[in-house]
Amino acid sequence: MEKTTQLYEGKAKKVFATNDPQYVIVSYKDDATAFNGEKKGTIVGKGAINNQMSNMLMQMLEKHGVPTHFVEQLSERETVVKKVTIVPLEVIVRNISAGSFAKRYGVKEGIVFDQPTFEFSYKNDDLGDPLLNTSHALALKLATAEEIDTIRTMALKVNDLLKDYFAKLNVTLVDFKLEFGRLADGTIVLADEISPDTCRFWDSTTGEKLDKDRFRRDMGGVEEAYQEMMRRLTGEGK
Ligand code: TMP
């Protein structure tokens, strides 16, 4: 598969057209942003780690019946994926209080929920990705009621699969953000990425943060955290 023209450049990835209209190539960057692009930096090696980690996880999810955009990894940073129209919803599942949940509701981080929470943000940088509920998403025609049902069922299944998968690596999956896309025939598939940029990972023994919060909160050890997650996933260096 050949890259042709660049279609889009986002905060963490570029997307290229290919000679086949069904497929695009994503290229992962080391650029990191937080707080809707207000904070900018570089996490050396992040692009290669997020690409490979996301591909491993998407393949695991496919094996368990979750349809994804993944097609084929081309190189350390580049992957062929199915071309989709992204549903403009950031789909967030939480198992433990942290981040904006802890802040919004005035609770400490680390409260383990009896059941996962499920929420949407409107994927719109100009508005700062505001939180919205299902009736808001329907009013704004961001997705149909049927699509929202599908997305909710898939996101909760992804949570069950990822929670178990990471638990075996002594990693607690605190929360994460997913994005879904529509194929040309309307089928909903999991898209975007699953990585330390889009998940909160805590070491299950020490509670140490192994994700992008280290960058967001200027904690240091950012590259090391991404590398540590990659080591646990690939089973290398043990
Ligand atoms: P939050 O607690 O800041 O709402 O984040 C919830 C989860 O979503 C967390 O795992 C990080 C991820 N996330 C993104 O992937 N992109 C974003 O722009 C934000 C704000 C959070």
Image (cartoon, rainbow, N blue to C red):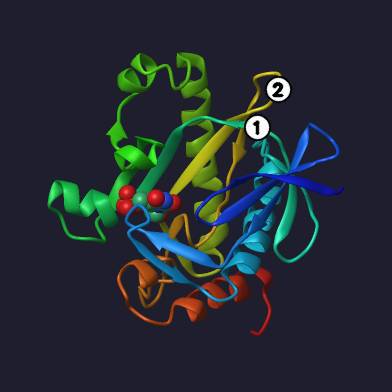
- Place of residue 99 in the rendered image (x, y in percent of width and height, measured from the top left): 28, 56
- The residue lying at 48 percent from left, 60 percent from top is 197
Residue type highlighted by circle 1: Val
Q: Is residue 180 above or below residue 219?
A: above
Res. 82 image quadrant: top right
Q: Residue at x 74, y 45 (%)?
A: 5
Is residue 200 toward the left or the right of residue 162 in the image?
left
Callout 2: 10 Å neighbours few (<14), some, many (20+)? few
Which residue is pictured at 70% across the width and 63% down the height?
A: 77
Q: Quadrant of residue 121?
A: top left
- Indicate left or right for 83 with 115 as reference: right
Which amino acid does the dot numbered 2 rest on? Ala
Q: What secondary structure is found at the residue carrying circle 1?
A: loop
- x then y, percent, for residue 111: 24, 56
Q: Is residue 23 left or right of residue 182?
A: right
Q: Which residue is mark 2?
A: 184
Residue 84's mark? 1
Nearer to us in this view, 37 or 216: 37
Q: Earlier in the sequence, mark 2 or mark 1?
A: 1
The numbered mark at residue 199 is: none
Q: Compared with residue 195, is residue 94 higher up or lower down, i.e. above or below? A: above
Q: Nearer the viewer, residue 227 or 128?
A: 128
Q: Is mark 1 within 8 Å of ligand 1?
A: no
At 51% from the left and 45% from the top, the residue drawn is 160
Q: Residue furthest bottom?
A: 237
The furthest residue to the left:
106
Dot 1 surroundings within 10 Å: few (below 14), some, or many (20 or more)? many
Quote the CA–CA distance across marks 2 and 1.
7 Å
